[in-house]
Structures are given as structure tokens and as C-alpha cells.
Image (tube, rainbow, N blue to C red):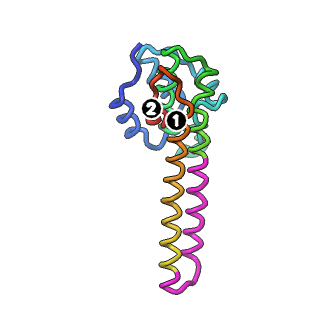
Amino acid sequence: MELLRPEEIERIEREYAQGLPARVIVGLFVEKGIALTEATFRKYVQAGLLPRSKRVGRKGKHQGSQGLYPVSAVRRMNAIKQMMAQGMTLEDIKASFVVFKNHIELASHELGQVFDGYERRLDGKSLGDRNRKEMTSQLRALRVQSRELLQEIARFGSGLTARPGVETSPSDLQ
């Protein structure tokens, strides 16, 4: 069984930057001879091992919407399959860094929305140039600090949950 190589994952990340449906993700692995079904994929999502999809409307009348998974799900699925090939069970994987990574990604997304909201408020407020510049600078610094904190939390979690003898780097789980 040959997993997706880093350059393949990078190509997929560029090609599907807006996200991709479960059937496409499953197909990427099946093409490599890796056993994976949509039912198993959904099971991993429900277990918190993979990020949830977002509903995205299709162009055209009565076209409905489809669930698109963030492209990070491909990298994460590759890491899960790698861990399983190294003898880890789903319970081992759940106890690993993967589940925490989902929480960290969610926190990052939520903080991004908070900062975006503050930026919109700043744009709509009538402030003096000096005050606006000061507050914009402070908000920018807070955004950077939050990003750095989340990265530090991810590094801590990676070290804490690493299983001896199993090499899975935090970048495999992004």
C-alpha cells in the first residue's frame, strides 16, 4: 500500500483549495489501492478524526448544495492511514494529536471571525486617524499573537501525544 506522497498532497491542496466532496477524497485513496469507502470516511468525521464539511451552493436554479471538506482532510486521512499501517487502532488515533488538531482548527477559525468582525467595526467607526491607526495596529498584533499561540499549542500537543516508535509529525496532520 502506497500512501499519497507529499508532492501529491501539495498538488491536491492547490487544485482543490476551495474544498472537495467526500467521494473525490475517497477516490484519491482508492486509486492508490488504499481501502476506503464513503461510509468509513463519514465514520472518521463523526469520530472527530477528520474535519466536518461545509455546505456550498451550486450555481444554477434548483441545483442544491454539496458538502465540501477542507483540503486538509486529504492530508489528515493520509496520516490516519499511515498510523493504521503502523499498527495503531482507531482508539489510539483518537487519543493522538489528530482530535486535538480539529479543536485547534476550529479555534483558529472562530478567532478569525472575531478579528474580521472587529475589523469591520473599526472600518465603520468614525475615529481620528491616529486612533484608527493605533487600534488597527493593536488588532493586527493580536491576530498575530493568536496565530502564534495556536501554533505553540499544536506543537505542545504533538509532543504530548506522540507515541514512541511511531513517527507522525504535526505537519502530517494539518
Which quadrant of the figure contains the N terminus?
Answer: top left
Where does label 2 land, which residue? 169
Q: Position of residue 33 (x, y in %)?
A: 43, 13
Give the camera-side residue of 115 and 39. 115
Q: Residue at x 57, y 50 (%)?
A: 109
Q: Quadrant of residue 12?
A: top left
Q: Residue at x 58, y 36 (%)?
A: 51
Report the disc number at residue 158. Answer: 1
Can you name the residue that lies furthest to the left here?
7
Most common secondary structure along the magenta stretch: helix
- Chain part drawn in magenta: 107-131
Can you name the residue that lies furthest to the bottom here?
128
Amino acid marked by disc 1:
Ser
Q: Mark 1 Cα within 10 Å, few/some/many (few <14, many 20+)?
A: many
Q: Mark 2 Cα within 10 Å, few/some/many (few <14, many 20+)?
A: some
Amino acid marked by disc 2:
Ser
- In this picture, is 90 found above or below 54? above
Give how far apart the Cα atoms at labels 1 and 2 are.
7 Å
**Along the polypeptide, which appears first: circle 1 or circle 2?**
1
Q: Position of residue 37 (x, y in %)?
A: 56, 18
Can you name the residue that lies furthest to the right here?
46
As helix, strand or loop, the secondary structure at mark 1 comes to helix
